[in-house]
Amino acid sequence: MTDISEEAAASPLTSTRSAVRSTGDSLRSVFRNPNLRRVQLALAGSMIGDWAYATAVAVWAYGVGGTQAVGIWTAIRLTLLAFTSPIGATIADRLPRKKVMIGSDLTRAVLVMLAALCLFLDLPAATVFVLATLASLSGTAFRPAQRALMPALANRPEELTASNGTASTLESLAFFVGPALGALLLGVADVPVVFLVNAGTFLWSALFVVGVRVPAAAAPRAKADADDEDTPKQSFLTETLAGFRTILADRDLLVVTTQVSAQTVVAGASAVFTIVMAVDILGSGPRGVGYLDSVLGVGAIVGGFLAIARATRLKLAQDMTAGVVLWALPLLLVSVWPHPVAAFVAVALLGLGNPLVDVNMDTIFQRIAPDEVLGRVFGAVETCLISTMALGAVLMPLLESWLGLRTALAVLGTAVTVVALTGLPRMRRLDDRLTRPVGIDLLQAIPMFAPLTPAVLETLARRLTPVVVPAGEVFIREGEPSDRFYVISSGSMQVTQDTAVLRTEGPGDFFGEIGLLRDVPRTATLTAVEETELLALERDDFLDAVTGQIDARSAAEDIVTRRLAV
């Protein structure tokens, strides 16, 4: 009996240690990667500065026109962001993403410095509002470009998830540090000084992005297509809407977007119900919002580490659904038990769920959305989320005044939970889709595929078709049409030309590339020495991958030249 008890007690401890070790390994892998490390440091500086800047703008706007000025400016800014996000994302796909990030940083730095100058010169308030708005709009290209670039910088899917988790955790920390920094600076200096500090954080961000070494495989395909005379030219509006079309065409992406949009309805509503909870439940007045926000931030930090720890569990979609549910079910707790403890527990759970949604959403889109429209997909999602957040902010006061806080929270929590659970079967199938495909290790080991991004390799691996060749069977004859590329998974094949034996190929070896690249019939005969398992890649998939990337094409030509010389 004692042994059983000790084993039961040790099991949670072992699981905890394993989770902590997994989290540590994931974080170390992110910061060991110089490119990912630079991007994370760039994000940290930029986000902390943004929060400090937001605090300073809100304080200044309140001094100019009270809560009405703050509310009107916020509404105008969010509306413009909803419309301009797809445009910024299109720019992120049409131009080199690293340059887009640097350009966004530098533009924002200049605009913020100009706003500080306007304050120093005591120019009309309208000029500062315009510059502050333009600074926000100039950032719409930064995050889509950064998110779309991450798959090219990560070495494997787990590292990509860990990097997204690190970014989410840094964002949660910035939520604390940024406003605190803004408040501290406002206590010892004035608003223009905070603006200048924020300009410095944008320069900090740009400096780290400059040091990022982007693989050639990350060059935006949209630009390459634009340079192709045979490619029909699309209008800018058509290109801008490509992100929406991609989401609508892929049922998995559509379900993910729907679930995250449901979560952001609650996020928008939280701006209202946290105030009501602070006044009616905590009894602390409006200052209680600060307490609730602090607990939300702590939950988000813990949630960030949880998302990183689960990066290797291959449950991205289901974890994301769990995060959406954590933004809904806790509201029912407050509805049933309107007590300060319930309020703090509910808000902590909201914070815990936030990184599970954000991190896994980013990783899912990075893994399955086509690279050439990835920035625009993120821009389309951003537009949806801004819109649903605004919907939540508008809807919650109506529900609260009509039904009361407790019933309004119950309605909102139940509705979002139903949306999340309805999509759960699809999310389970999506996790199967995200499982590391068979054959990707074989492709990675082939020199002509090595320069391709992990996302492109995964796509190719999912398109591989298994083929079994019985021992002694002539599989390919010299002079036949070239239609596929093959990789040997197990067994061996003898390669002959006329009657001469050229070589015997085994697991990891490949054939068929000469006929495809040179557009000629098969140049050799291949016979199975033993039962052999092959993985086949169709002609168009092979040519699109290899010829569409300079380093891959160069490696392929080297292989063809060597083999023809034999």
Image: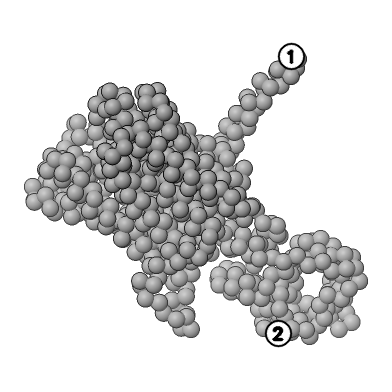
Residue that badge 2 annotates: 520
Left or right: 229 with respect to 271? right
Q: Nearer the viewer, residue 88 or 420?
A: 420
Q: Is residue 346 above or below residue 424?
A: above
State which mark lies toward you, 2 or 1.
1
Residue that badge 1 annotates: 2
Left or right: 272 with respect to 120? right
Three-letter amino acid code at disc 1?
Thr
The residue depicted at 67 percent of the width and 56 percent of the height is 437
Q: Is residue 101 above or below residue 274?
A: below
Q: Name the element at disc 2.
A: loop
Sequence-wise, the earlier of marks 2 and 1 is: 1
The residue depicted at 19 percent of the width and 31 percent of the height is 188
Badge 1: residue crowd in 10 Å (few <14, some 14–19, many ≥20): few
x, y percent for residue 133: 23, 53
Per the model, the C-alpha gap separating discs 2 and 1 is: 74 Å
Query: Which quarter of the figure is the N terminus placed in?
Result: top right
Three-letter amino acid code at disc 2?
Val
Badge 2: residue crowd in 10 Å (few <14, some 14–19, many ≥20): few
- Residue 417 is at least partly visible in this image: yes
